Image: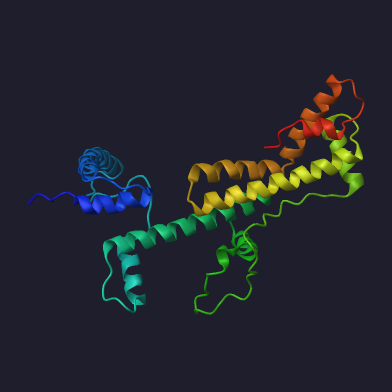
Amino acid sequence: MKSKPWSSSSVGSVAAQFTDMRISGEVKNKLIDLLLLRLNKIVGEIEFETLDKEPERKTLGDPRRERLGFSRTRGLILDRIKKVESVGAAAVVCINEELEKYLQELILLSSQAASQNRVNTIKMRHLEKILGEFDVGSNLETSDSEPNNNSKNSDFGTLDLEINTNPTTMKKLCRTLAGLPVSDECVEELLLLYSDYAEELEYKLREALFGNNLHAIHENMKKLEDIRQLGFLRRMLRQAGEKARVEGSKKVEVWHVIQIDPF
């Protein structure tokens, strides 16, 4: 027996999550047609990719990514429900997506910790580091269901982006990067700009992680690695040094820096 498509009310309810506007009945019916056309394309692609990956497979899967086991998650949910009697497929999918997003967050942050150590393997010390620094570990429990007292419950917005602010060290570093002497006022302005840039990066990375925006996560991770390797200071001072030389100045001054967009 051929399956019926979704009802217009069902499609309308889902679509209503993405807009504050009213959706007409005609539009809802058209959305059903468009979803069916899209479904035809998706099923054909996934069926081909499933068999291309595993020619002997008899069940349609998701060849594009690995997922947590549906049945295993459903069983674990059943063990934990208290006020309802059963678990629907939608609930399993929803919870699996939340768990996978959480797993992604842990791995992304742990990989960043590993890269700081200049190693290519995520080890327990990297995971423990991010659990101690970020609130991703605040909801974790030990195997005996007791809270992990070794974790620090600090705010997420601390990515340890501090640099050495010793005036003498900073002036030497800035002179090396700019290729010219750098005034004290310029060094002070650079440190303030660095702080603003780091704060903005932390905010964007946090938003990308919790919004599950993979492209934004990737882009901000690259910026994070760049800032750790003094990419921000190198870029700012190189441009400021060029401006100073064009003006015939023998020193990089604060006005050379404030002409540059740090973002």
What residue do we see at 36% from left, 76% from top? 80
Q: How is the image coloured?
A: rainbow
Residue 88: x %, y % from top left: 27, 65
Q: Quadrant of residue 28?
A: top left
Question: Where is 132 relative to 48, above or below?
Answer: below
Q: As drawn, is 233 to the left or to the right of 25?
A: right
In the rendered view of the protein, which quadrant contains the C terminus? top right
Residue 260: x %, y % from top left: 74, 31
Question: Where is 44 relative to 204, above or below?
Answer: above
Q: Does residue 168 appear anywhere in the picture?
A: yes
Q: As drawn, is 27 to the left or to the right of 242?
A: left
Question: Where is 148 relative to 106, above or below?
Answer: below
Q: 150 or 86, which lies in front?
A: 86
Count of numbered circles in the view? 0
Residue 128: x %, y % from top left: 61, 64
What residue do we see at 33% from left, 51% from top? 16
Q: Quadrant of residue 241?
A: top right
Q: 2 or 121, which lies in front?
A: 2
Q: Does residue 121 appear anywhere in the picture?
A: no
Q: As drawn, is 29 to the left or to the right of 125?
A: left
What residue do we see at 52% from left, 55% from top? 105
Outermost residue on the left side: it is 1
Residue 117: x %, y % from top left: 68, 52
